[in-house]
Image (cartoon, rainbow, N blue to C red):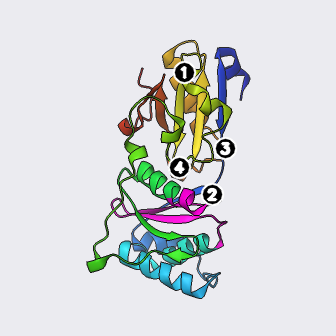
Amino acid sequence: MSAGFLAAGAATYFSPAWDRWFQSAPSAVATKTAPAAPQPLAGSALLTEQLLARYAAALPSLSTQAREQRVRDYVQAKEHKAQAVSLQPAGTWRATGRADAQSAEDAALENCQAFHGQPCVLVAVNETVVPPPGGGIWTGRDMPRVRYAGNFDPNQIPGAAHLRQRADIAGYASAAGPKAVAYHPASRVFVVTQADSQRTAEEKVLDMCNSDPARNPAEGLCFLYAVGNQVVLPQRLRKPQS
């Protein structure tokens, strides 16, 4: 929390490095940027084999090396964890270090959908790989929290079960304005209250989120989540609304 934000009001944030994104690239590009000699895949041989098969079926544009890296990252990640896949645009998203398996599953699917803009497919939860769909037709699972547009409610923030009791989030609805909330699919939520104006609140909260040193630039910019007490996430705003 910087002095500049304190002068204008109250600003708080939290930035866990729990979720990770990967956008698929054409095979030639992925091959060029992948390690020349990939290390052997770690972890359970069965888990590795099943995940590689799911990636090959759901994301055929991914190179072999890219698939192996995604599997390696997942196998080595901390539980509770889950892996989701975006079919169009092609990419993946995983959630790790969650309180329980259900929280991990929800976070992977919700944050994947928020990032990619379309419902995603669950492929694994902890050490269990989800069976392939019947008939080979992959269908994304729509997550309602990503489409929620009502009054601010901590329980509606996607992928944020571990943050809902945080003081600034739990008390945001009753906090003095002007105020705004910013959100990034990597389970980051930022809050500004008591700003000089609504425009200032939105500018500052987006700047805080986008300048977070823990944010990977490849993961894209943050979204404006709430303007005052109104949730605006479905509008996918990356700039102030006011």
Q: Amino acid at mark 3?
A: Pro
Q: Residue furthest top?
A: 196
Say which residue label 2 marks. 98
Q: Secondary structure at mark 4?
A: loop
* Distance from the alpha carbon under mark 1 to that under mark 2: 29 Å
* Distance from the alpha carbon under mark 3 to that under mark 1: 23 Å
Res 60 visible:
no
Nearer mark to the viewer, of 2 and 3: 2
Please report whichever mark, 2 or 3, sits nearer to the chain's N-terminal start. Answer: 2
Q: Are marks 1 and 4 in contact (CB under 8 Å)?
A: no
Q: Position of residue 61 (x, y in %)?
A: 37, 72
Quick check: 71 left or right of 87?
right
Task: Give me the disc on residue 179.
Answer: 1
Q: Are marks 2 and 4 in contact (CB under 8 Å)?
A: no
* Distance from the alpha carbon under mark 1 to that under mark 4: 22 Å
Quick check: 227 left or right of 60?
right
Please report whichever mark, 3 or 4, sits nearer to the chain's N-terminal start. Answer: 4
Say which residue label 3 marks. 213
